[in-house]
Amino acid sequence: MCRWFAYIGEEPALLEDILIKPKHSIVKQIDVHFLPNLHISYGEHLGKKMYSSGVASDERGPNHFTNVDGFGIGFYTGVAAEFNDDYINRPCVYRNTRPPINDLNLASLCAHTATKCVFAHIRAGTASSPIVETNNHPFIFGRYMFMHNGYVANFSKIKVKLLSKLSTKAYGNIFGTTDTEHVAALFFTYLGDDWDAELEIEQLKEAMIKTLRDVLALIDETKNNNEEISLHSALNFAVSDGCQLLATRFASTDQLEPPSLYYSTTAGPTLNRKYPDHPDGKDSRRKSIYETDKHGKHAIVASEPNTYKAEDWHLIPPNSFVFVSRNFDVSTEKIQL
């Protein structure tokens, strides 16, 4: 499956420090994985959950090995808001279908760009969705970014009915063929047509609940007289306006462990060269300008940790929301559909 990474905070982060340099950075999560505290896996045929040893490993876990079908980042700089009459801080996006670890343009961009909010996504596409830049996450709707790790079951069968639920504006904002972008359009249909408005996290939550309900109901309609094997979906979504963030770790059945998802409120200094420590461990520590306690408040939500300190990372429970407020406080809540 795909991987994604999100950083949001009051302290700017250099993209190179959080996306490129770490041993476990997202650009290296093509087939190298670090999954502390992930104790549950599932059988090949989704029979029942099996408890693993707890060793940080992707073997037989709820993520596949290879992600080579494109990469994208979205981030906020505030520059457009300074130059445009509406003063709205919309995200900048970079997408490419080449493996990110060999993308020299990406490396240069990340070495010279800092941001207080970034989404990064490495894609594992499906056979029905081509490898083109328009299919790379994150997807942009006004001031908002949206990305996904997982899959929507029977998407080809529900697509027509899903499209019928979309607003004209949301339909017109679809440029690719992925299940994610279509679900995102449904989510933003429920948010209304003003995607530049500063909405409350509760409004994002309500729109996400409606989206999940609709998608699962459409999938359920594709079953043939209950004879078809139960259809599983994995729906790890993330959405942000650059000031707050909502994410989900969700599977449509208890038989399926959702793709891994973690959060941290302490890994930021380790991922910033201005501070002591190093994401790869004590042996790689660097000279620092500031003490760790001077780092600003922040939150990271990611498919996998990208620092060596497993204790900095918390595995989000299955079927849960993750909220990051405008004050960068993190909370989780069980998803009730």
Image: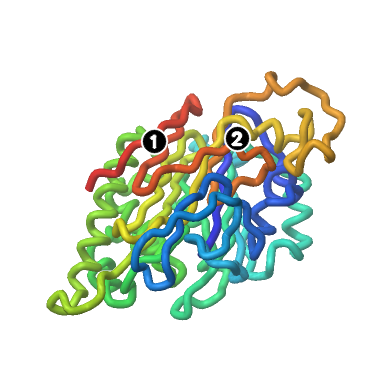
| Display colour scheme | rainbow
* Front tag of 2 and 1: 2
Q: Which mark is residue 65?
A: none
**Could you say whether the residue bearing mark 2 is in a helix, strand or loop?**
helix
Q: Is residue 201 left or right of residue 130?
A: left
* CA neighbours of label 1 inside 10 A, class few (<14), some (14 to 19), many (20+): some
Q: Is residue 285 above or below residue 163?
A: above
Residue at mark 2 to residue at mark 1: CA–CA distance: 18 Å
Residue 167 falls in which quadrant of the image? bottom left
Residue farthest to the right?
A: 287
The amino acid type found where label 1 is placed reads: Thr
Q: Is residue 143 left or right of residue 76?
A: left
- Is residue 148 visible in the rendered image? The answer is no
**Residue 272: percent from left, percent from top:** 73, 35
The residue beneath circle 2 is 311
Q: Is residue 310 above or below residue 98?
A: above
Q: Is residue 113 above or below residue 225?
A: above
Instruction: Choose the circle earlier in sequence order: 2 or 1.
Output: 2
The residue beneath circle 1 is 332
Q: Residue at x 30, y 72 (%)?
A: 159
